[in-house]
Structure formats: C-alpha cells, structure tokens
Image (cartoon, helix red, strand yellow):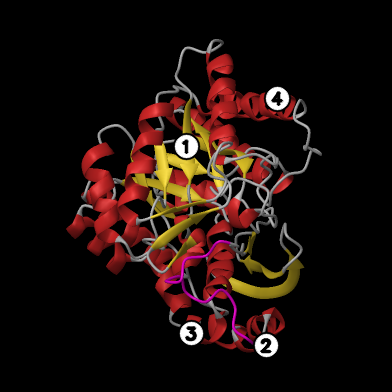
Amino acid sequence: MIIKKIKAKKIKNSRGEDTLKVIVKSDITKGTGAAPSGMSTGKHEVMAFPEEGVDFCVDFINKELPKKLLGLQFQKYSDLKKVESLIDINKYGGNTLVAVEYAIINSFGNAWEFVDENSKQVPRPVGNVIGGGAHVRSDKVPDFQEFLVLSLNCPSFVKAMEANYRVHSLVQKKFKKLKKFNNEISDEGAWIANISNTEALDILHESIKEISRDYDFVLQIGLDVAASSFYKDGKYYYKNYSNEEKVKVLSSTEQIEYIGGLIEKYGLKYVEDPLHEDDFEGFAKLSEKYSNKCLIVGDDLITTNLDRLKDAVKFKSINSLIIKPNQIGSLLKTKKVVEFAKKNKLFCVMSHRSGETLDTTISHLAVGLGTPLFKTGISGPERESKLQEVRKIVGQIKAKIAE
C-alpha cells in the first residue's frame, strides 16, 4: 500500500471536545482514523494534544506531513515505524500520531488482518452499567468510576454482548424505582443515580443474578475503582461509601482490606485501579491475596507503558492490564506492551476512552493483538459501533476458517 493523500480535520468527541480525524488515500483504498480522549487520565500518559490545540495538529498533518509521508509504502505492521519517525508526540501529542496510524491501518480494509492475519481469538465484552467518579460531574454518585458486567466463560461474543445489554436495561428499570433518577447517563453510557457504592453493587449484583438464569454461562461484576481520583496525601476519601456511612477516609491498608472484602462479598471477577497510580506494592498485596479469584487490573498504574509494566511484573502487582493506544501514543509500542504482557501470562483488556468517537479501530486491534477482553461500554453510538464491528469481524473469521 502506497500513501497518495492525507488530510485531517477537527471533529468533536462524545463529550463535545475537540479532537481530530484523519483520512488517508492509498493506491488500494482509503482509511480513516479518529482519536479519543480520556477524562480520568493517568499522570504517566503521554500528552494527548499540545497546548496549541487541535488546529495546530490539523495544520501540521495537512501542510507539513504530506511532504514526507506521501509515496511511502506500508506492507506490514512494523512499517508503522516510518510514520512514527515523522511525528514528534512531544510536540504534536499522542492523539495526533495514533489518529494517523489508525487511518493507515484502516486503509488495508480489514485492519485486524493487517495486525495479524492469523488471529482467531475474539475478545469478550466488558460493559459499563452504572457510572460514578470522574465520569460524572456530581458529588451525589458512587465514588467508584464504573460498575461493570462481564463473562469470561461465555462461548460467544454475541451472546455476551446481548447479556450485557439486558443487564444494562434491567438496572435502568430498578433505578426508576428510586426517588432520584432522571434517566441520566455518564460519559460512557452508564446509568447515573444518587446512590452509594454499596447500593450500586447491590443493585448490579441482583440484576446479574436475574439475567444469568437465562444463560448457560456466568455473568460477573467488575469495578473500575479509579482510586487515584479520590486519593490524597496517603488516604482515600470517600463521599458515598455506603448508605449508613457516606463519608469515609481509609488508609492504604484499609483500602486493600475494603476492596478485598468487596471481592469476597460480591464475587467480583475484575477490579481495575483499586489503589492509586504509583502504588505498585499495594497492588501486589491485593494481588497476592486475590489474583486467584479476580482480575487485578492496572490502568493508571501502567498507562500502556512498557517500563511501568516491567515494574508491575517485578512487584507482581497485577495479573491484568488495560490497553489504550493513545496513552502511549504509538501502535508499535502498544504491540510491544501486549507481547510482553502475554509473555508474562497477564490478561490484556483493550479499552475505549470516555471521550470517544465512532472510530472502530480498537475493535480490530482487540482481535488482531488477541486481547481476551474488550472494554467498550454497552450503550451509545460510540460504544455500540465498536461492539458491532467486533461482531462483523467474527463473521469474517468464520468465513475465513470455512474457506
């Protein structure tokens, strides 16, 4: 594939914030790529956009980049080093490079095959049902950022997607019985209500039990605690701890005990960022006790950064990690993180961002890189488009196997 033309334009993400979309035309076809943005971002992530803003990056792509990019040939994933050498993410931000790379790999049609034509592993969806924390601009919500549903033993992506949607719908019905619920949703399409952490867990647990009766696989609860968002000076400050005790301050030791208690009580199968983003040793203490029962997932702890992942492996901090390409601003570095994680027998979770677009590249990356889980919400066009794209890829893989 030889690049013939590249163009960028400013668009809005799902939160109404500025981001960019890139269109690449090649001698084969054309591809597009759009960059998402996170609200709850780890401090170790690369800069998304520079202070000069999105227009500055659009001008660079439209005026400067073509001088060096046009005419370059891309045949395999490692060829992305050609574009990575042309875009300084310290000057233009990780989102600029990622959007260009997305457009390039989408120029090959089925991007998952460009990543790995032999890939047959389809991830299982992790869906956001109840929202809180930084994804909701209110104090009257749970402290935990996401209350999730997933199934690790579901034999079908489509069935798991259907079950997640049914849990989402049932929780809405249960919320309608509450006094303060106005059908509001979070940045990621999860339901918002004036409830505590424990009340949210109780409602989700009850809903999952009801829906599970109709399936021959087990639905389970996950949490994105996003603990750094309410951590300060060595303490965790809760505003909606429980119905009986709204305000609560926990030490690191107490936080580990609290999360461990929730894993036991609710049978949690997935806990993301249960401690602040630099507490490798605290993660390790939690993992030592519960990694045989639960996925202890690092997001802000790792930020798709190989050096931080190596530290986590050294400390035995996690058994799972979030993969977000624009956290590190490079598809080549993203692949290296996934490969290192697999080598060390860690679970990888390809993930969307809270400020999303209709771009579906991460669906292809989830399949092409072989991540067992795919965290992309349940409801809303930006989330559903990614789920439907994986569904389409399932059909392509089946057709390929049948050939």
Q: Amino acid at mark 2?
A: Lys
Which disc, if any, is residue 63?
A: 2
In the depicted structure, whether residue 341 falls above or below residue 372: below
Q: Mark 3 highlights which residue? A: 90
- Which one is closest to the eye, mark 3 or mark 2? 3
Residue found farthest to the right: 182
In the shown orientation, is residue 192 left or right of residue 333? right
Q: CA distance from mark 3 to mark 2?
A: 19 Å
Q: CA distance from mark 4 to mark 1?
A: 19 Å
Residue found 50% across the figure and 59% down from its top: 230
| Residues in magenta, as a range | 40-51
- Which one is closest to the eye, mark 1 or mark 2? 1
Query: Is mark 1 in CB contact (under 8 Å) with mark 2?
Result: no
Report the front residue among 67 and 316.
316
Q: Mark 1 highlights which residue? A: 222
Which disc, if any, is residue 174?
A: 4
Which disc, if any, is residue 202?
A: none
Q: Amino acid at mark 4?
A: Lys
Tell me where residue 28 sits by quadrant: bottom right
Residue found 36% across the figure and 35% down from its top: 261
Q: Is residue 330 visible?
A: no
Q: CA distance from mark 1 to mark 2?
A: 45 Å
Residue found 51% across the figure and 36% down from its top: 125
